[in-house]
Image (cartoon, rainbow, N blue to C red):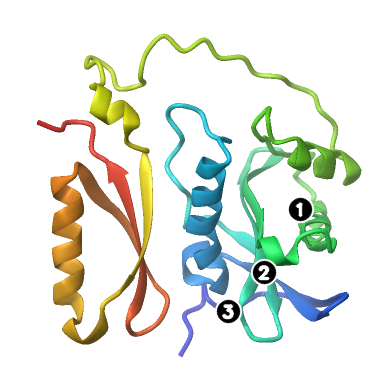
Amino acid sequence: MKSPSQIADSESDQHTAKGPYCIRFYENCSHSPASWLVPQALSETEENGFVDRSPALPIFEEPCVAAIGADGKAMALITYYYVPGRCNITLGYTKSDHRRKGIHTALFNALVERVTKRGDIFSIFSRTHAKNLAAQAAFEAQGRTKEYIEYFFHLKDAVVGKEPTAEEMRMPEYLVEPFDTGPDGLKSMQAFINEKAAEGYGLHQVIERSTYQWVLIFKREADRG
């Protein structure tokens, strides 16, 4: 039995060169089939260098709109939230094998249609890294306009009151670790969590993919001894 937040409240059929997919809205991304894309997106963003020195915490419980393939798996998603008069996009991601097929634009257009129907939203806000030229080109092709440019002058690590050690500066802020419990069950997972704790990482998020397959997201602990 699916929870209310797992059930899509609307959907529309779309097609790519390889087949159909549905666009669906979910009130809680963490309970949707698209939740698995979030750690993938964070990992890829970090690998490409599209993060600042102190990235924000990943958002899993915001609403999202996702492209769901015929196999029930998510191909792309956009997460967002509302503030007075505005819809803020926090994450947009499409799996690498589904890019350049117009899926992200279809999701954005679906979001535009939804927020327009609310009647109290006047703009949709999004941001990306200055080096992410592909995203900037996609945004402008969708009709978004560049209105702000942000500048940072980093003096030191964002941890207040403590200078980072050389080891800490080499450690990424987040680790995304797929994990298969196998026959040992959750006992083996706890041992893995303990290993990461010894390395200076605390468990931040656990996502269940199947009975034995999980995704563990660790965050670097600020107060390492």
**Amino acid marked by disc 3:** Ile
- SS type, badge 1: helix
How many numbered discs sit on the rendered protein?
A: 3
In space, the residues marked 2 and 1 are separated at their CA atoms by 22 Å
Residue 105 picture quarter = bottom right
**Amino acid marked by disc 2:** Met
Q: Earlier in the sequence, mark 3 or mark 2?
A: 3
Q: Nearer the viewer, mark 2 or mark 1?
A: 2
Could you tell me residue 66's position as x and y percent? 67, 66
Q: Pointer 2 and pointer 1: residues touching (CB < 8 Å)?
A: no
- SS type, badge 3: loop
Disc 3 target residue: 7
Q: Earlier in the sequence, mark 2 or mark 1?
A: 2
| Residue 12 seen | yes
Is residue 22 shown left or right of residue 54? right
Q: Earlier in the sequence, mark 1 or mark 3?
A: 3
Disc 1 target residue: 115
Q: Residue at point 78% right, 37% down?
A: 136
**Amino acid marked by disc 1:** Val
Disc 2 target residue: 75
Say if 19 sits above or below 66 in the image: below
